[in-house]
Image (cartoon, rainbow, N blue to C red):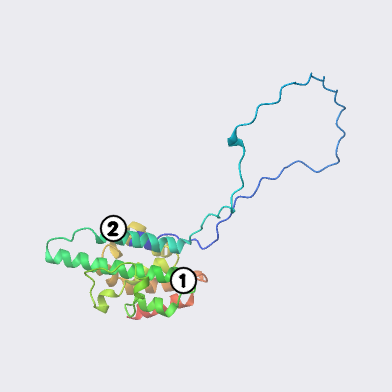
C-alpha cells in the first residue's frame, strides 16, 4: 500500500512525437544541369512476370483503432485491485492473532482500493471520497474491487491512516521529501505499521500543513487541506 500510495501520478496528456522537418532553407530553385539522354535498349518481346499475390493488398474495412490511453490514476486503481486479488487467495496463518492481523490488513487494503477507484472516477464527489477515507461510507457493490471474506463491520478498522492516503491525494508527492527528511527513516518510523501511522498522524499532518503554507501549496486542492486540518485536530 505504501508503494502504491507513493506512485507518481502525472496528469498531463501524453504527447506524440513530432515529425522531423527538413532543415534546408527554402531558397530559390536552381536550374539542374542538362542530363544526357540515356541510350535506348531494345524492347522485350516477352511480357513481364506477374507479381506474387502477396503484393496485392486490399484496403481494410475500417481504419485501425487508435491506441488506448489509460489515465495514471485509473492504472493505479487497477494495479491495486490486481494486487488485492492476489493477496486474498493466499492462505491465512494458523494462529488466531496472526490471522486476525492479516484479515485487518486485507480489510484496510480493500478500503484503500475503494478510495483509489473513487479518486480515479472522472468528476468524483469530494465529500464521498473523504467519507470513504474516514470509514463513514462505502462504494456501491458494483464498484467495489473485492469482497474480503474476513471483512469487519467496525468503522474504526475501516478508517484509513492519513499518512497512507496523503501521498495519493498529493499525486504521489512524498511527505518525507516535502518535509525535507530522510525517506527511509520516515517510512520506518511512521509507515511500518498501522499503529505507528496512527500514532504519528497528528504531528506529521500539522508539519505538512505548515510546510504547505511556507511554500505556497497552490497545487494542493482546498478540500485536501480542509481534510488534513480535520485529521490534525483528531
Q: At which x and y percent is residue 126?
A: 44, 77
Quarter of the image that includes the C terminus? bottom left
Tag 2: Cα neighbours inside 10 Å, few (<14), some, or many (≥20)? few
Question: Which of the numbered marks, if any, corresponds to residue 67?
Answer: none
Distance from label 1 to label 2 (Cα)?
37 Å
| Circle 1: element type | helix
On the image, numbered disc 1 is attached to which residue?
A: 212
Task: Pick the residue in front: 131 or 62.
Answer: 62
How many numbered badges does the structure rendering display? 2
The answer to whether residue 40 is left or right of residue 82 is: right
Q: At which x and y percent is residue 106?
A: 26, 66
On the image, numbered disc 2 is attached to which residue?
A: 86
Task: Pick the residue in front: 59 or 169.
Answer: 59
Quarter of the image that includes the N terminus? bottom left
Residue 89, compared with residue 157, is above or below; it is: above
Question: Are the two marked residues, 1 and 2, in contact with CB atoms closer than 8 angstroms?
Answer: no
Task: Pick the residue in front: 83 or 207.
Answer: 83
Q: Residue furthest front?
A: 46
Query: Which residue is at a point 27% across and 72% down the rendered structure image?
Result: 199
Tag 1: Cα neighbours inside 10 Å, few (<14), some, or many (≥20)? some
Q: Residue furthest left?
A: 95
The answer to whether residue 35 is left or right of residue 105 is: right
Query: Which residue is at a point 42% across and 73% down the rendered structure image?
Result: 209
Residue 146, compared with residue 47, is above or below; it is: below
Query: Which residue is at a point 35% across and 72% down the rendered structure image?
Result: 162
The answer to whether residue 111 is left or right of residue 177 is: left
Amino acid at each position: 500500500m505504501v508503494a502504491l500510495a507513493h506512485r507518481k501520478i502525472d496528469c498531463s496528456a501524453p504527447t506524440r512525437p513530432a515529425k522531423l522537418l527538413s532543415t534546408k532553407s527554402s531558397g530559390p530553385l536552381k536550374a539542374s544541369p542538362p542530363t544526357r539522354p540515356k541510350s535506348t535498349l531494345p524492347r522485350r518481346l516477352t511480357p513481364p512476370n506477374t507479381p506474387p499475390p502477396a503484393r496485392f493488398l486490399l484496403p481494410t474495412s475500417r481504419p485501425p483503432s487508435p491506441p488506448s490511453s489509460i489515465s495514471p490514476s485509473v492504472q493505479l486503481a487497477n494495479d491495486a485491485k490486481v494486487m488485492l486479488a492476489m493477496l486474498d487467495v493466499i492462505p491465512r496463518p494458523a494462529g488466531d492473532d496472526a490471522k486476525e492481523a492479516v484479515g485487518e490488513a486485507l480489510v484496510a487494503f480493500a478500503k484503500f482500493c475503494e478510495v483509489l477507484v473513487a479518486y480515479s472516477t472522472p468528476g468524483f464527489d469530494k465529500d464521498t471520497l473523504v467519507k470513504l477515507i474516514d470509514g463513514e461510507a462505502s462504494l456501491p457493490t458494483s464498484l467495489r474491487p473485492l469482497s474480503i471474506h474476513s471483512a469487519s463491520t467496525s468503522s474504526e478498522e475501516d478508517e484509513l491512516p492519513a499518512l497512507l492516503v496523503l501521498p495519493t491525494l498529493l499525486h504521489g508527492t512524498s511527505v518525507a521529501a516535502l518535509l525535507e527528511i530522510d525517506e527511509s527513516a520516515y517510512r520506518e518510523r511512521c509507515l511500518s505499521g498501522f499503529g505507528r501511522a496512527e500514532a504519528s498522524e497528528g504531528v506529521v499532518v500539522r508539519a505538512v500543513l505548515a510546510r504547505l503554507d511556507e511554500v505556497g501549496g497552490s497545487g494542493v486542492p482546498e478540500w485536501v487541506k480542509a481534510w488534513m486540518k480535520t485529521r490534525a485536530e483528531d
